Amino acid sequence: MADFEKPSNTEDEYFAREDIEKKRKLAFKQGQELEKKRRDELKNLHFMKCPRCGMDLHALKKGDVEVDTCFHCKGVWLDAGELEQLMETLGQESSGKVMKAVLGLFKR
Ligand SMILES: [Zn+2]
């Protein structure tokens, strides 16, 4: 009798473990999906909003680069690589020119 139950118990344990593993994977996947959804919501909420004051950002063209600017707090924001691109556009030894170009964004 005991010999009969043993394989059955092992089988039950196997399926129980399989079930637990399936549920663990599902919970992990759901967590990842929730995290992505949260990131997307945050991105939608903050896209083209000033990180300092929260007002709308406006893309102003400076050479080939579009510099995101805030007319409320006069913040100037650059995407990855845009500072280098501005420097390149304005030529060598251009750090002074870049600063002038950025500072001059709000001048009329
Ligand atoms: Zn601002």
Image (tube, rainbow, N blue to C red):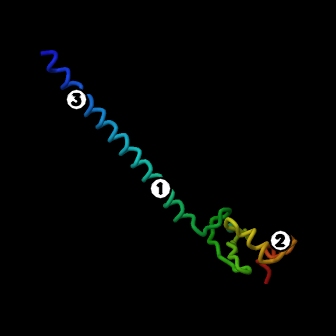
**Does 15 appear above or below 28?**
above
> Which corner quadrant of the image does residue 59 belong to?
bottom right
The picture places residue 13, in percent across and down from the top left corner, at 26, 28
- As drawn, is 47 to the left or to the right of 62? left
- Numbered mark located on residue 11 in the image: 3
Which element carries disc 1, helix, strand or loop? helix
| Cα–Cα span, label 2 and label 3 | 72 Å
Give the residue type at disc 2.
Met
Near-viewer residue (101 or 15): 15
Q: Position of residue 34 (x, y in %)?
A: 43, 52
Q: Name which of mark 1 and mark 3 comes first in the sequence.
A: 3
Name the N-terminal-most of marks 1 and 2.
1
Of badges 2 and 3, nearer the viewer stands 3
Nearer to us in this view, 50 or 3 = 3
Neighbor class of circle 2 (other Cα within 10 Å; few <14, some 14-19, many 20+) is: few
Residue 64, percent across and down? 70, 79
Q: Quadrant of the N terminus?
A: top left
Image spot of residue 70 (x, y percent): 69, 72
- Amino acid tagged 1: Lys
At 37% across and 43% down in the image, what residue appears?
25
93 is higher (above) or lower (below) than 11:
below
Kind of element beneath mark 2: helix
Q: Which residue position is annotated with label 1? A: 36
